[in-house]
Image (cartoon, rainbow, N blue to C red):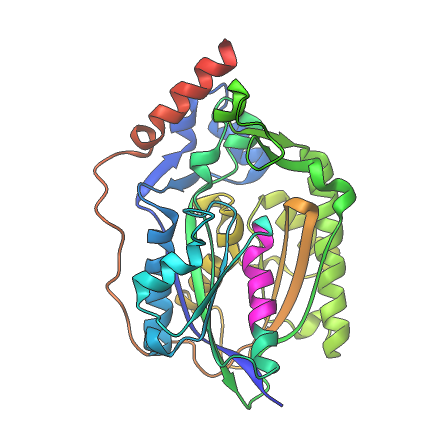
Amino acid sequence: MQFAQITGWGKCIPPAVLSNADLETFMDTSDEWITSRTGIRERRICHCNFSDMAVVAARHALAAADLDPGELDLILVGSLTVDSLCPNTASIIQDALGARHAAAIDLNTACTGFLYGLHIGSNLIKAGAHSKILVIGGEYISHYMDWSRRDVAVLFGDACGAVVLEACQEETGLLAASIGCEADAKYAIQITNLGSSYSRLDKEFLYVGWNFDGQEVFRRAVKSMAQACQDVLEKTGLGVQDVDLVVPHQANKRILDALARRLDIPEEKVMVNVHKYGNTSAGTIPVALTEALEEQRIKPRDYVLMASFGAGLTWGAGLVKWGDGVVPLKTSDATLPPCDQTALEILEPHIRRYLAHRSA
């Protein structure tokens, strides 16, 4: 039987930092209010396009795997804030990388985008349809934010991560996954005024809105991720005690703590970086996974449990058996274009527009 090993990993973190203190300059909030409820202290704001972040993360992942882009046969991009819908953004990334032989697919399952992509890509390799796949997850969500709403705006940030999957004969990679959707709660997280159900003739169309039911999201997220984790452990015949590291979706520290308690997993086995970046949606797991490897928290043959939830409400979990490679085979000097603005300066037009709209 063929398996899909993770052979490369990489991330792209924009340089502009938006701290809680920065938010205090235009929003009725405070560092204490934000950190006590979310654990988030700062987040990053992208000064260029989403695809620029994706290409940087991809180049680092390809270098780590020592793989030429021309060898890729598929690119899967999980994101809801892509550069464009037509052409799809995976094709923009394919062209920038020079991955001429790769098919290119965009996936939109919100925050679960990377995990869904990992599930799909791994199974395509196991089925023999592909042999070398690039899976990207990331978000440019700060530019779609209603900056007049502290209940939502403090949560999110921009970042991107990527992994390379390659066919192998060893039993490594994604051993089992469980994905699903609780669509009866689809409006618990909703971005409005985007899509064909909103009229372009409406003067409100230029203002992207948010519906966000925090309590419902919290309840559903913890329940669905815990159940999905238990499902994949049952599928593999392993127990919680066999898991070496949990890399969950970094949405909110309270959710991470509640998930760990429900699974009975000790805090030291949970990868947490939400305090640095906030919720980067589809970017959280690949970025956290890359940082776990950088911090030497993953060893050869470790079992890594991933879990996520997102708008839809989509949910999922996957159990990965790591291979031998925990150090990049090569490195890349890929980086974003220089940024000469602060995060507040990048966002200033958006902030001013939404505050004026809210007070009108």
Q: Position of residue 256 (x, y in %)?
A: 62, 50
Q: Is residue 184 left or right of residue 58?
A: right
Give how far across and how far down residue 105 sits, in percent: 50, 61
Residue 303 vertical placement versus 219 (above, below) = below
Comparing 297 with 54, the one in front is: 54
Q: Position of residue 147 (x, y in %)?
A: 47, 26
Tally of numbered tags: 0
Q: Residue at x 38, y 68 (%)?
A: 61
Q: In this picture, which residue range is highlighted in magenta?
A: 111-121
Q: Looking at the image, is 205 positioned above or below residue 268?
A: above
Residue drawn at 44 percent across, 45 percent down? 277
Height in image: 78 above or below 321?
Answer: above
Residue 208, image x and y in percent?
52, 29
- Image point (69%, 40%), residue name: 217
**Residue 269 shows up from this direction:** no
Taking the image as drawn, is residue 227 in sight? yes
Please identify the quarter of the rendering in which residue 126 is found. bottom right
Magenta region, mostly helix, strand or loop? helix
- Residue 247 vs 309, above or below: the answer is below
Residue 313 magenta-drawn? no
Location of the N terminus by quadrant is bottom right
Find out whether residue 116 is within the magenta segment. Answer: yes
